[in-house]
Image: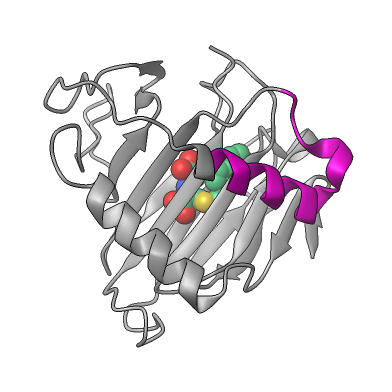
């Protein structure tokens, strides 16, 4: 379903086996060095979702090759299979012509417990305009997709469930968005995840 120009939601894109494999890999990537960490914003805020990065380390508001606001270790490599997954996701959601020439080279993985949220923000630290690919695992969340002008209305709320794909290209690439709530206990029982996990794939342009 196209939620806005260039913003396409594909429910249940990952089958159960792929969801389990991705979760296992994410748990592995979350281990030190350069594992899961808490992001602190320059304004003194703390993100409630915890994050691990592959390829490039994101910190507010730039990218680095080391976990500069974590343990300082070199960031884990971005695996080729995630680059292939990113291309396939864009082709399925937006069509083959929308697949970017430059390879996907960043994964940001956010881990949400039942109380975690993500405030309305824009993703503007990448130097390329390639579509962002989002994959959800575990608990359902309310995802809020806004506009390019303000953090407030108008916005559209969409439930994102385990296995869902969302691709943000075109004029949606710079739209405000956030996660106002997670619905605890809604993860499929066969997955074995308490909480929610979101993987975004990006092109750094670096
Ligand atoms: C729209 N993640 O990592 S996924 C983020 O569920 C982020 O963890 C949320 O916002 C999460 O920056 C929302 C949907 C999403 C991800 C990236 C986007 C929507 C986006 C980038 C540009 C526009
Ligand atoms: Fe974002």
Residue 130 appears in which quarter of the rendering?
Answer: top right
Any part of residue 110 in sight: yes
Q: Report if residue 186 lies within the magenta region.
A: no
In the image, is 87 to the left or to the right of 195? right
In the image, is 197 to the left or to the right of 130? left
In the image, is 195 to the left or to the right of 136? left
Q: Residue furthest top?
A: 206
Q: Residue furthest bottom?
A: 189
Q: How is the image coloured?
A: one colour
In the image, is 56 to the left or to the right of 144? left
Q: What is the x, y in percent for residue 112?
A: 31, 59
Residue 9 appears in which quarter of the rendering?
Answer: bottom right
Q: What is the x, y in percent for residue 198?
A: 43, 55
Q: Report if residue 91 lies within the magenta region.
A: yes
Instruction: Identify the residue shown where x is 19% and y is 23%.
Output: 69
- The overriding secondary structure of the stretch rendered in magenta is helix
Q: What is the x, y in percent for residue 87?
A: 68, 42
Any part of residue 120 in sight: no
Foreground residue, 59 or 71?
Answer: 71
Q: Residue furthest front?
A: 80
Instruction: Identify the residue shown where x is 36% and y is 30%.
Output: 77
Q: Which residues are magenta?
A: 82-101
Location of the N terminus by quadrant is bottom right
């Amino acid at each position: 379903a196209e939620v806005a120009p260039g913003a396409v939601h594909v429910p249940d894109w990952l089958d159960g086996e792929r969801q389990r494999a991705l979760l296992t890999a994410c748990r592995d990537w979350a281990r030190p060095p350069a594992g899961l960490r808490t992001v602190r914003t320059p304004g003194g805020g703390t993100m409630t979702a915890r994050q691990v990065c592959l390829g490039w380390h994101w910190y507010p508001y730039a990218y680095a090759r080391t976990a500069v606001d974590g343990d300082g270790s070199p960031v884990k490599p971005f695996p080729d299979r995630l680059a292939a997954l990113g291309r396939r996701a864009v082709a399925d959601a937006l069509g083959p012509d929308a697949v970017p020439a430059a390879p996907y080279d960043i994964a940001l993985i956010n881990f949400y417990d039942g109380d975690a949220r993500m405030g309305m923000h824009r993703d503007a630290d990448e130097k390329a305009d390639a579509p962002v690919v989002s994959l959800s695992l575990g608990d359902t969340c309310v995802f809020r997709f806004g506009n390019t002008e303000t953090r407030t209305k108008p916005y559209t709320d969409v439930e994102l469930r385990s296995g869902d794909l969302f691709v943000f290209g075109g004029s949606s690439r710079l739209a405000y968005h956030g996660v106002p709530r997670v619905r605890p206990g809604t993860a499929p029982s066969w997955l074995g995840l308490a909480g929610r996990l979101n993987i975004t794939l990006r092109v750094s342009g670096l």
